[in-house]
Image (cartoon, helix red, strand yellow):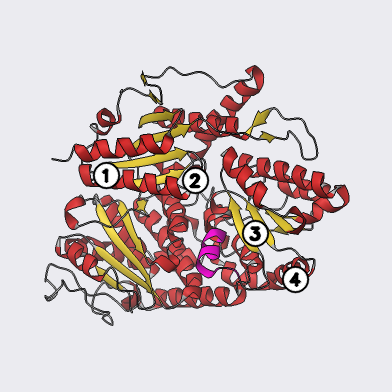
Amino acid sequence: MKDNFYPGSYQTIIDKALAALQAEHITERIWTRDYTVWKPSPAEISNRLGWLDSPWNMGDRLTEIKSVVESVRHDGYRQALLLGMGGSSLGPETFRKVFGVKPGYLELAMLDSTDPATVLSLARSLDLSRTLFIVSTKSGGTVETFSFMKYFYNQVLAALGPEEAGRHFIAITDPGSGIADWAERLHFRHTFLNNPDIGGRFSVLSCFGLVPGALIGLDIGWLLALARAEGKREKASSDDKSAVFSTGHKGEGEKISPPGGSQKDSGAQPGKAVISAALLGATLGELAKAGRDKATFFISPQIESFGAWLEQLIAESTGKDGQGILPIVGEPPGSPEVYGDDRVFINVSIGEDKRRHDLLAALHQAGHPVIALSMEEPYALGGEILRWELATAVAGQRLGINPFDQPNVEAAKVLARQMVAAYRDKGKLPEEMPAWSSEALDIYGDVTSLKNFLGQAKAGDYIALQAYVEPTEEMDMALANLRLRIRDRYRLATTVGYGPRYLHSTGQLHKGDRGAGLFIQITADDREDAPIPDEPGQSSSSITFGALKAAQAMGDRQALINSGRRVIRLHFRENLLRELERMTFDIKDELP
């Protein structure tokens, strides 16, 4: 299968954007690390472009990585738990779900939730004597990661003693970070110091992604080789203007045809065999400016987890300065009638997967722009990662923003820290008065029902479900059903994120975009809790995981309110799944 490109009526504006990229030599300047592509100042740009070199430079680190992996295997380790958030966990999660675990290597799990039931469930599932903990944080100061490290270090210390505890930990971080210092003090088995000029969401082809990948038996050398091949293609296309700066008839791919019919002539042109990052990024940027700012992904099941990585890359990079491209991943497909005119559809398939062919044809016929990308086999992810990183950089240029900073992320962190300080001072979080209460549910906000809250929505808005609860299969299903009812009833794009995970993924866009979101925060009483040690190796604790999670939810909600966003909080004191199901059917009953 080949890439295909169907811009529909947006062909002209995309052609103009590509002409501007050519006239300003944008792709060449990106490869030469010219910060003026995005802003007149180098701040948070010049020191964030190291990802361009990763496919080449990381080859020098393969011996180090493989040596540590072999030593861990030799010592009998069978499990690994990655402690990290956002860019530190989403790439490794993708690798684990796409490639599985090679026989003889380590079963890998990720912890990126402060939900106490999640922490405790993982702790009870581990054989500590055979588990390696990967403390992964660029800054070294991520509160969630440091809390996880303290908790599990104490668990290993109690089980195995001080002489053995440190050997069960490795760190991946930037030089000079706080975690690097703790790794030395606690005698970690190894510390991988990453290139500090790589931002978290662009770091998957560096130590942050490759070390966990090697632990599951991934051939990281081949992954990097395919990334280099993509980089070579993109660099070469900078010189071949017909390869980058054309949207049609340059080596036709498969045409999308409606079932039983021929391709409709609606301004769409069959695209190139390989869509360049320049074309992909320019298209997403221009469509967003034209109102189609909801990039809706359909992804083959085998590589479906790639969507979570894409979600962070696009949302955190483009959602700022009143701009934003909202990635929609995991939303169940629907007929063209349930979608508004704010969508662009992107199908990412692998091998000969054609399951979305008829749907893409119907969406194209209905006037929606459609992009179809294909991968030959799983290791092609190496090249696909680099293509999307480059495309995101180009999209940022078209939107006039810096795609490498995250100016609004700190707002929620500051407010959460204030909540934590209040908890440590008074032993409880600040109290809020609900707008409406029942035996099972409290509603916080300016309205007294979910129906009234959703009634504020208008065309072009989106609904974000933010669930500060334990992520389980049952909860996944309940949230999927709720988002589907909302989408079909209101014809609005929907997203789902577990807190605090989404704070490191889509949280920047929520506060930095044009304000089109309606945020439904879902919280619940914790059935059990776990203390967070104040220091590694100490038993004293001034806060629990449950309190930290609640503080993060309160801090983010207040940050959204301060940014003028529309927010409702649904707090379930009992029967969470049953009450969510009831709300879902209430929305269904409102269908005309």
Reading the image, the residue beneath label 2 is 471
Residue located 57% across and 70% down the image: 55
Q: Residue at x 72, y 57 (%)?
A: 131
Amino acid on which the number 1 mark rests in the picture: Arg
Horizontal and vertical percent position of residue 523: 46, 33
Image quarter hosting the C terminus: top left
Residue 485 is tagged as: 1
* Range of residues picked out in magenta: 92-101
- Marks 4 and 1 sit apart, C-alpha to C-alpha, by 49 Å
Q: Mark 3 highlights which residue? A: 195
Mark 2 or 1, nearer chain start? 2
Place residue 544 in its image quadrant: top right
Provide residue 239's location: percent of width, then percent of height. Answer: 40, 77
Assess whether residue 100 is covered by the magenta stretch: yes
Mark identifier at residue 70: 4
Q: Type of residue at label 4?
A: Glu
Q: Secondary structure at mark 1?
A: helix
